[in-house]
Amino acid sequence: MPACFGRRGSEPGGTRVAHSPISHGQTPSASNVTSDPTQNLQTFELLDLQQYTQEKVYSPDASKLFHLFFVGRDNVHGLLKHILSRVRLSLYLNMFGYDDDELNEILMAKVMDPHVTMLITLDKSQAGGKHEKLLLDADRHQALAQFNTHFVIGQSATRQISHTKGFVADGKVGAEGSTNWSASGEGTFVLPERAGGPGFRAQNNTQTIFTDPDSVRRFQTELIAEHMAAQNCATPRELKQRKLPPRRGG
């Protein structure tokens, strides 16, 4: 079976990106603390993530509000788990390439937690994968809005792809960059604590994590706007499938 589902993994201009799915099937790693409610982002600072860099420590003059990580060099998959598994209040997410089993497991736990408000936007051209199907099935059977979870699969306001790859967690931590959620997109480590090894693959991608309050607020506002635009671009059939009220005048 091909690694990609339908048009999954397509980038603008028709370029294919290998999005081989991550399949763990093992006990979650130490950075995944979803099951421990005492772990949260209330005291988060960027220094918490220096353990995921190749050097295991930042430069003395590194910013305390912004840090840039590199796929294929730093443990981007690990730092994403670190942040996402500690979400306890809210998650605003727009993700173009969504093909990571472990990150999806973390999000599905949050999806079913009524204490966590979630706004999820996924790209329509990438919507043929199993992870989007899990969300759709959960919504049909559980009415996710009752759990404070709202998601849409759609397009930009001008009916182009929704190419944002980022999130705001608990209103405190922002993440944005070129990293798709896939094994090669994140450069998921196959060896303990370092890049490389048999079967290791990594795209040239960056992942920025920031805590600057103004940037976090502005990005969260943008994610809400992109979510609403994707809803407005949904067809009547899609609205019926999602059990959303029809748009006025549409």
Image (spheres, rainbow, N blue to C red):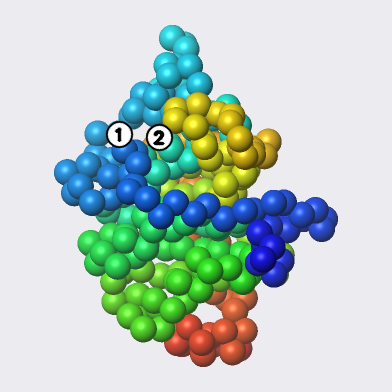
Query: What's the CA distance linking mark 1 and mark 2?
Result: 9 Å
Give percent across and percent down for residue 144: 35, 75
Query: Which image quarter holds the C terminus?
Result: bottom right
Give percent across and percent down for residue 247: 53, 85
SS for dot 2: loop
Observer-nearest residue: 16 or 206? 16
Using the rendered view, name the quadrant where residue 4 is placed.
bottom right
Q: Are the two marked residues, 1 and 2, in contact with CB atoms closer than 8 angstroms?
A: yes
Disc number at residue 44?
Answer: 1
Query: Which residue lies under the disc numbered 2?
Result: 211
The residue that appears at 43% across and 9% down in the rendered structure is 60
Query: Which image quarter holds the N terminus?
Result: bottom right
Observer-nearest residue: 210 or 26? 26
Give percent across and percent down for residue 138: 39, 76
Kind of residue at badge 1? Phe
Earlier residue among tags 1 and 2 = 1
The residue that appears at 62% across and 71% down in the rendered structure is 128
Kind of residue at badge 2? Thr
